Amino acid sequence: MANNLSIVEKSAKMRTLKADDTFQLALKEITEQQVAVFVNADSTTDQREEAHNIICALRKIEDYFDSVETDEVMYNHKLTKGESAP
């Protein structure tokens, strides 16, 4: 289903998620939980590595949202220039 969305539709959905307070709260709380693993002196290397991987994954999600928005900006710019875009 998501593969059939236009750039504009996908970007709108990403903006909706980014603006959703519950979604943002979940991201914040998960990040804080993982940071707590780093500051806990009793954390094992494996626990710290897993926390690092989770934080990296959350950043990738945020980066993806930003890239979709950038794609829409570029698409809209091409439209105003009269070029065809996907």
Image (spheres, rainbow, N blue to C red):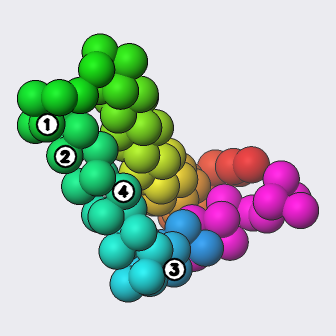
The span from disc 1 to disc 3 (Cα, nearest Å) is 35 Å
Q: Nearer the viewer, mark 4 or mark 2?
A: 2
The residue to which callout 2 is attached is 36
Asked if 36 appears above or below 65 in the picture, the reply is: above
Instruction: State the predominant SS element of the stretch in magenta.
Output: helix
- SS for callout 1: loop
The span from disc 4 to disc 2 (Cα, nearest Å) is 10 Å
The extreme front residue here reads 42
The span from disc 1 to disc 4 (Cα, nearest Å) is 16 Å
- Dot placed on the residue nearer the N-terminal end, 3 or 2: 3
Please give the label number shown on residue 40.
1
Residue at x-position 10% and y-position 29%: 41
The residue to which callout 3 is attached is 16
- Dot placed on the residue nearer the N-terminal end, 4 or 2: 4
Please give the label number shown on residue 30.
4
Asked if 12 appears above or below 71 in the picture, the reply is: below
| Start-end of magenta stretch | 1-12
- SS for callout 4: helix
The span from disc 3 to disc 2 (Cα, nearest Å) is 29 Å
Contact, mark 2 vs mark 1 (Cβ under 8 Å): yes
- Dot placed on the residue nearer the N-terminal end, 1 or 4: 4
Determine if the magenta segment contains residue 7: yes
| Residue type of the residue flagged with mark 3 | Thr
The extreme top residue here reads 45
Residue at x-position 54% and y-position 67%: 14
| Residue type of the residue flagged with mark 4 | Ile
Q: Nearer the viewer, mark 1 or mark 3?
A: 1
Q: Nearer the viewer, mark 3 or mark 2?
A: 2
User: Quadrant of the rendered structure where residue 44 is?
Assistant: top left
The span from disc 3 to disc 4 (Cα, nearest Å) is 20 Å
